Image (cartoon, rainbow, N blue to C red):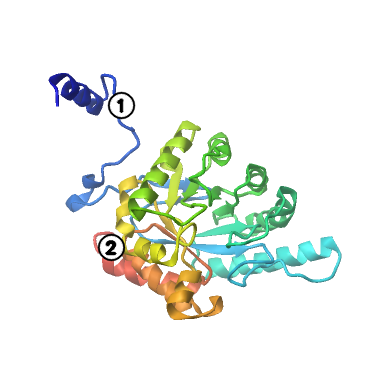
C-alpha cells in the first residue's frame, strides 16, 4: 500500500480526508461489559420506554385478516351488514388484546393484510377499514400499551398512526422504497426494518442479511429517521428456505454487529412445522424452543401468537442468561 493511500485511509477512519466520517450512530460491539456489545440506547415507543438488554420483550400478534397462515385471523367470512361485521371484528380484537396484555405482552402488533406466501393483496382502503377501528378501540381501552402497525403501505401506516399506533413494522424494510421511513421520520415514531427477499438465494446467508439490513438502516437515516429509533428483524420465514431459517437461529448473535435492537418472529411458522411434521395449530413447543434460543442470544423482542407461554419461557431464560441485570 502506498504512503498516500495509507494516509487517505487513516484520514477516513478519523473522519477527515476524502473518506468521510464514520457513521456516528454505530455502536462498537466490543464496547460493552466484558468485551460484549454495547446495549442500544433505550427507545420510546408510545407510552413506554424499552430498555434494551435488560430482558426480552414479548410482542403479541393481532391479525385482522381472513387468511392468516396460523389460523388466528379475526376477519371471518360470514354474512351480515358491513357495520355489524366491523363491530364484531373490533370487539373480538379488543378481547384478544386485553387477554394478551393480561398474559404479559409488552407491545401489540396489528396487521390487516396477511404476509404469508401466496397471500391475496389487499387494497389500501380495505386494509385501513380493517385496522383503524381496532387500533382506536385498543388505544382507548389500553392507553398504556404500545401499538405497532404491520403494513407495507404508507397510506395505511399514516391512518394507523392517526388512529393511535406508535410504531411502524415494515416487512419489506430492506426494499428501496423509502415511503415508510419518510413517514416514520415525519411523525417521529420508531420503525422496524425487516429483512426479506423475493427469492431465497444466498451465497453467505448471515453476511448478506446483515449487509441488506445495514443498507436499510442507512437509507432510513438518510430519509430522516434517527438511528436510535430503528429496530431490525432478520426476517425468519421471509425470502428464506427452511435450512436458511435454521441457520439464522444458530447465528442470531451475529446480528448484534448492527448495533440496533433485534426483533424475531418465528411463531407457528412453516419451518417449525416441517421439522416436526406438525400443522400451524400444533407448533407451540417448537415456537417456545426458538423463544428460548432467541432470548439466550440477546434478541430484544419476540413476536408471538401464544403470549402466556412465551412470556414464561422468556422470563426463565432471561433469569439464566442475564445474571448481570438486576
Which quadrant of the view contains residue 316? bottom left
| Residue 309 visible within the image | no
Q: Secondary structure at mark 2?
A: loop
Q: Could you tell whether 283 is left or right of 30 in the image?
A: right
Residue 199 or residue 83, whichever sits in front: 199
Q: Secondary structure at mark 1?
A: loop
Q: Is residue 285 above or below residue 234?
A: below
| Residue 310 visible within the image | yes
- Where is residue 260 drawn, in percent x and y? 37, 47
Q: Is residue 303 above or below residue 29?
A: below
Viewer-nearest of discs 2 and 1: 1
- Where is residue 12 drawn, in percent x and y? 25, 25
Q: Circle 1 sits on which residue?
A: 21
Q: Circle 2 sits on which residue?
A: 322
Local crowd size for mark 1, using a 10 Å CA cut-off: few (<14), some (14–19), many (≥20): few
- Where is residue 186 drawn, in percent x and y? 57, 34
Q: What residue do we see at 50% from left, 64% from top?
A: 105
Amino acid at each position: 500500500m502506498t504512503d498516500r493511500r495509507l494516509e487517505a485511509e487513516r484520514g477516513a477512519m478519523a473522519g477527515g480526508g476524502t473518506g468521510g466520517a464514520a457513521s456516528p450512530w454505530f455502536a462498537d460491539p466490543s464496547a460493552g461489559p466484558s468485551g460484549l456489545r454495547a446495549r442500544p440506547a433505550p427507545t420510546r415507543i408510545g407510552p413506554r420506554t424499552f430498555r434494551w438488554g435488560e430482558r426480552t420483550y414479548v410482542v403479541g400478534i393481532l391479525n385482522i385478516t381472513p387468511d392468516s397462515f396460523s389460523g388466528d385471523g379475526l376477519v371471518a367470512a360470514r354474512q351480515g351488514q358491513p357495520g355489524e361485521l366491523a363491530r364484531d371484528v373490533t370487539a373480538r380484537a379488543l378481547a384478544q388484546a386485553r387477554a394478551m396484555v393480561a398474559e404479559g405482552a409488552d407491545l401489540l402488533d396489528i396487521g390487516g393484510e396477511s404476509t404469508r406466501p401466496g397471500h391475496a393483496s389487499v387494497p389500501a382502503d380495505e386494509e385501513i377499514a380493517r385496522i383503524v377501528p381496532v387500533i382506536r378501540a385498543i388505544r382507548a381501552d389500553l392507553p398504556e400499551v404500545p401499538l405497532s402497525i404491520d403494513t407495507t403501505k404508507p397510506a395505511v401506516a399514516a391512518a394507523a398512526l392517526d388512529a393511535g399506533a406508535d410504531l411502524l413494522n415494515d416487512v419489506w424494510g430492506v426494499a428501496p422504497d423509502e415511503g415508510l421511513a419518510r413517514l416514520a421520520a415525519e411523525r417521529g415514531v420508531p420503525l422496524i426494518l425487516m429483512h426479506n427477499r423475493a427469492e431465497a438465494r444466498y451465497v453467505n446467508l448471515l453476511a448478506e442479511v446483515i449487509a441488506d439490513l445495514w443498507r436499510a438502516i442507512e437509507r432510513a437515516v438518510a430519509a430522516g429517521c434517527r438511528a436510535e429509533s430503528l429496530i431490525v428483524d432478520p426476517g425468519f420465514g421471509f425470502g428464506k428456505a427452511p435450512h436458511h431459517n435454521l441457520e439464522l437461529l444458530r447465528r442470531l448473535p451475529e446480528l448484534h454487529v448492527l448495533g440496533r435492537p433485534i426483533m424475531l418472529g418465528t411463531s407457528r411458522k412453516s419451518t417449525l412445522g416441517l421439522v416436526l411434521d406438525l400443522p400451524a395449530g400444533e407448533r407451540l413447543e417448537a415456537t417456545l424452543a426458538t423463544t428460548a434460543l432467541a432470548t439466550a442470544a440477546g434478541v430484544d423482542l419476540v413476536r408471538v401468537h401464544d403470549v402466556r407461554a412465551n412470556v414464561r419461557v422468556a422470563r426463565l431464560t432471561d433469569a439464566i442468561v442475564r445474571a448481570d441485570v438486576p
